[in-house]
Image: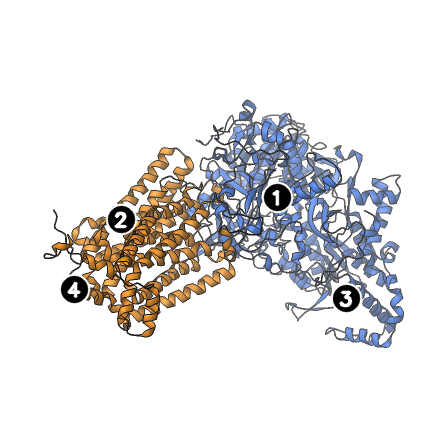
Chain colours: A orange, B blue
Amino acid sequence: MLKRNQLVLGNKSLKDVTDDVLLPLETPPSKGWLGMLAGALTIFAFYLVIIGTVIANGMGLLGVNHPIAWGTMIVTFVFWIGIGHAGTLISAILFLFRQKWRTSVARTAEAMTVFAVMTAGIFPLLHTGRPWLDYWLFPYPNQRGPLWVNFRSPLLWDVFAVSTYATVSMVFWYVGLVPDFATIRDRAKTKLKKLIYGSLSLGWRGTAKHWSHYEMVYLILAGLSTPLVLSVHTIVSFDFAVSNVPGWHTTIFPPYFVAGAIFSGFAMVVTLMTLVRMGFPQFKDYITLDHMEVMNKIIMTTGMMVGYAYGSEFFIAWYSGNMYERFAFVNRAFGPYAWSYWVMITCNVLIPQIFWFKKARRSIPLMFVVSIFVNIGMWFERFVITVTSLHRDFLPASWGMYAWSFFDGAILFGSFGMFLTFFLLYLKGVPAISIAEIKPVLGVGRQEGGHHG
Amino acid sequence: MSEEQNQPAVRERDSRYYLGLDEWMKDPEFQSYVENEFQSSPIREGSEKEEGWARREFLKLMGASMAMASAGCIRRPVQKIVPYNKQPEEVTFGINNFYTSTWSDGQDFATLLVRTREGRPLKYEGNPQNPFHKSGLSARAQSHLLSLYDPERLKGPVKNIFNKDRTSRDTVTVKWDEADDAITAEIAKGQVGILTGQITGPSQKAVVLDFVNAFNASHFVWDGLNQDALLKANQKCYSTSDMPFLRFDKAKMIVSVDADFLGTWMSSTTFMSQFAEARKLNHSSMNQLVVFDSAYSLTGANADIRFRIKPSDQLWVLMGLAYELIVNQKKSKFSEDKDIINTLQPFAKAPERLKISQNVFAQMAKDLWAVKGESLIVTGGLALNHAQGEMVAIAACLLNEALENEGSTIDSNHLMLGMTASDTNLIKLIEQIENGQIKRLVIHNQNAVYASVLGARFEMALKKLDMIVYCGDRVDETGRMAHFVLPDLHAMESWSDLEPVDGVYAIHQPTIRPMYDLRSFGLTLMTWGYLTKKGPSRFKDIETYYDYLKTIIKDEVLQKYAKGKSFDTFWDELLQKGFVALPDFDKTGSKRKLNKLAFSEVKPLNAGLEGLQAAASLDLELVPYATIMFKEGSLSNVSWLHELPDPITKICWDNYAQISIALAEKLKVKEGQLLDLAVNGKQVTLPAHIQPGLHDQVVAVAVGYGRTAAGQVGNGIGQNIYHLGQLEQNQIQFSGQKVTIQVTKKDYPLACVQSHHAMEGRQIVAEVTLAEYLKNKSAGLHKHHIFSIWPAHKYNGHKWGMAIDLNSCTGCSACMVACQAENNIPVVGKKYILQGREMHWIRMDRYYVGNPSDAEIVFQPVMCQHCDNAPCETVCPVLATVHSDEGLNDMVYNRCVGTRYCSNNCPYKVRRFNWFSYTHKIDKPLHLALNPDVTVRMRGVMEKCTFCTHRIKSTKIELKTQGETYKDGDIKTACQETCPTGAIVFGDLNDPESEVSKMFFKDERSYALLEEFHAAPSVRYLTKIRNNGQPNRHNESHS
């Protein structure tokens, strides 16, 4: 039997774990954190102003036009939704597979999921022409007939998929937090803190009955989340696949989108984890290089899966004999937007290949750079799919180019402000590693700790 | 309609109407108010003149009463909703009223049915019964309506405050009587000139003539696009400069040398209609059009065979053809004529010079001879504005004579009466001003300072005059030079008449009361006669132009058009029908006598150099051309026309220097790169447009741009190039001048609505040659095996459908403007066109076919295809676009959230999105042009062609209330109605006898766009046929 590496380094005692994890919550914020929060808040405020301007003046401020009616907002929506995937995958699927290494990264990955879905969720609502009427997208009893929504529209499925996903992942995350909140409550020195975390911990006392219920709920939620990992991005891909635009209308989209989502999600986890390790050095013992290496392996694997999908698309476009389809793909790689295609190929397929080398997999600066490239590449993947397919479809007379504007960049940039604001607040307000889950795996790989098996 | 409703103009000078107010007027307080009012004018001058208070007093009172009368007529913005408690007869809220009227821009003309609602004209439609263009109209005619509501129209007379050099731009408003006073004092002194555009109505002609007689004035007729060369040629060949009416419908073969008769040349709407008539495939034979094109014209785009030439080639083309016909093939009555053969001799090597194969010429001559008497050679347009233009026109006369077309396709029995404008007249006027023969000038709506090569000289000359009166609708480039600008009524506010061709007389009714303090030009002239007591009695005694018109009809028109009929019957019929045509109007003939000597004047330029060497020179030649939108530059403040892409280049909101692909490669110029063009030492900087199918030694630039006083919309769009021309030996040299190009490094964005120009081997516009079609009627169509696992939709009542005959469509784009007017489609401007945000519901796709340097063009109007299996409908999450039980793809604006998914999923990309709130940006009173039948769309809402669903609904309601059933043709869409060639047919596909059904299901040429996609559109196209004598066309493969 292979000898396992230790999941937690530094021979931590149970108290050490609690102390380490709760350190950010129990110490005053550092200058670095405050500076980053100030930056993130500024971007967030800027984002809100941009959103307000777009709502006040119209979608025309962005580069969307005729024939490219979907642009930056949809691209960025799919980008953020994709990022959300890693969280659920780690917390739910790896939980079901009893992958113990997940415990130290699961909490943060889930938080990332929740914030990414929140960031993403704004876009479909915002990108409509009349955002104040977005509630019409939901089927609710009304006095207009009643007038229902169109259940044939993939966009409607999308509404359900994303809202379900957001709800379940939020509940899952929260349920996992309950024992830790109770720990914070128990250690709280101020009344206010006690009150807040007390109410958040829902009266957790840590009795055997509590634990038994808790684990059952957690298992059920993991079970519920698992199909969602597949379904959300499948349905997001239906927005494209069910339509009939050459370059969108392909059956490969669901698995390809899911693989891509996991790919980008893990890249984002790596990005954030390297930063968290930097900001909170005590976490290095919990989020070890081994963790990072495992995730890099996943990045490389899923990177090759999307690479395969890119190739497969081309093959099928040729094999189908459909001239529009063929043209769409040739145009992707060699048309006016070829640069974006090759940015995507380079970032998503070529660059992660460096992870064949163990040294690369275990080099923090390198993996940070690679993960940034993957993030860029995955944004461009959605750009390639959305924009290059639309810009040249059936009738050459209606071909056109995307009309970039300041607002396109501002929306994309600003969305990071929103995400980072939430994420930074999370790091200070919520234990970034699951105390309750990390304690049982303390012994994994330890020489003397045979009792954990 | 009865007389009472149609005389708003009656009150223009009807002082009797206010007799009852006299006592009140004499009230001292009121009088002092009136006086103060006048004293407030800063330009009040010489009030203490001796000629007396009595007259001034009278005029003041009259002025006041007029001001009150017109104040009563002013349309104020409606602030409250007040019921129409005295509802005029015939006016019902929500019901359209149609009035017959006319339209003319000097060159082109139309008889109209003007649709009005609640007293405001909303849309021009062609009078369907007229013998010229049916219900067809041009884009310009459609757009003319918008100029009525132009916010920048003058609202009353103004006076320019001149500085010493007359360069200042300040104006003050004046009262009509003050202006009249000052003007009549001047013009009574004599030496008066009057400059007008072409006058085609007897009443207009009479009123100007009366003015000329009254003041012993000289009349000059000029128009920006006048046919100077043709008039001169006619004068020489036939001793009369009158233009005969042309019958393209009777011509089996047409050769045009730079005469854009399908676009901008003379009565193009009528010609287009005639041309399409002779091209319909249900005739025994289809006509053939051969075009020699200096710029890529709309006519060239429709040619069966097109040759690219440069202006200096024109004469060689026609004379070469004549040489081939008369000398080589020894055909025609001139084949033995020594003089003519001698004249033709220098042109023996024309094919060599033109680099066109001798065989082509031989074949063309043979084909022409085969249909002698049924062919037509035309030339004309701006490209003839050069030293040899007149000879080119004479050469065309020679060919037409040789081919015996005079009297058949050239109908000199019916003259185009108004076509008398010429540059010669303008030159004469300028000379007479310069040598002091004319000291006072009245100008009616002719912007000669802008729209002429002689503009600068004319402007200088104007500064010498003691009094200039400009009667236009704004202080434009010429108006700036005038002492007084007396705003004329808009055509829709005034009575008039039109006799475009001898034998057809049309009445021009107003459809709205004058919106401001305006006066018709005719009445202005009459008023001056009245004030000075000069001129024939009808001129000074009749009080309104309306009465004057009736008098003229009684005295002159009745005689000619309705012998024996009483005036009242004739009048009523005229108003109702809109026009009257003489019974023998269709009978063509000739009443001109040929003067053969004229032909011997035709000589090649540089005869000594054998011409061949001249051809070897690589000088670039300037080709000024007119666009279908602005022609010489009028209607420049109409945004619809700026937004309408040029049908050939698909560029809007600019003019540019067109160069060929080879020239662009040679100069290393990219699209939109700025070029400094130098002609005669004069310069202009224009962006380059690389135009396939252009001659390599040609730089083609549109006139009509670069206005400086058109208004907020039109000012500063493009560059004016009129100043590049010059006057040499009393002949305007504009076309064919040597151009030198200096390439700059700067780029300039051109707003092109179509970025890709090839069909990429897809079956989009199916096109075959006539030979192929005759062999197999569905030639060129790849039929896909289509099956569906679903049952098709059932349509139990009507099923609306449309068929578009691409063989008739000329790409004139009138449908686009008609749709815009009908459906309240916003204009977005150049900035947003560049971003791909144009809003047209129907677009005119243009593809180049064949070798790029010699590219042919095909057009395809594309609107919502109203698919049975509409891809847009399934993807809308909120059911804002749904299928109707009559096959329409309905768009529910109220429900639309604006996800734009439908647009993405539409394979035809015909949906348009309101990116911003366009409707709120409509300046008042332009909002009056909005059609109340069609809702305006708010921001964030998708829109598209509705098949004019409001027309369908209102007709159905009307039929239901009258208990009638629907007959084919009861409902016409706006695009169909306005199409001058009848290319668009709309109707019920469930009725097997309907025209659209026959085209849709039975015509072998019919195909659906992207048929294999199986959206099952309700629009089908019919193959385009090119009658180019080729056995087949290299068919691009389609899988």
Provide the chain ID for the residue under circle 4.
Answer: A
Q: How far apart are labels 3 and 2 at the CA level?
A: 95 Å
In the image, what residue occupies the spot 49% across and 28% down? B783
Residue A169 visible in the picture: yes
Q: Which residue is mark 1?
A: B815
Q: Which residue is mark 2?
A: A96
Proximity of marks 2 and 4: CB atoms separated by less than 8 Å: no
In the image, what residue occupies the spot 18% across and 66% down? A16
Q: Nearer the viewer, mark 3 or mark 2?
A: 2
Q: Which residue is mark 3?
A: B179
Q: Tag 4's secondary structure?
A: loop
Left or right, B1012 with respect to B943, comes to left
Q: Residues within 10 Å of mark 3 (few under 14, many from 20)?
A: many
Image position of B163 with respect to A253: above or below: below
Provide the chain ID for the residue under circle 2.
Answer: A
Q: Nearer the viewer, residue B427 or A75?
A: A75
The amino acid on which the numbered mark 4 sits, given as a three-letter code, is Ser
Provide the chain ID for the residue under circle 3.
Answer: B
The amino acid on which the numbered mark 3 sits, given as a three-letter code, is Ala
The amino acid on which the numbered mark 2 sits, given as a three-letter code, is Leu
Q: Which residue is mark 4?
A: A13
Q: Tag 3's secondary structure?
A: helix
Q: Which quadrant of the figure has residue B490?
A: bottom right
Q: Are marks 3 and 4 on the same chain?
A: no
Q: How far apart are labels 1 and 2 at the CA level?
A: 65 Å
* Sequence order check, earlier mark of 2 and 4: 4
Q: How far apart are labels 3 and 4 at the CA level?
A: 105 Å
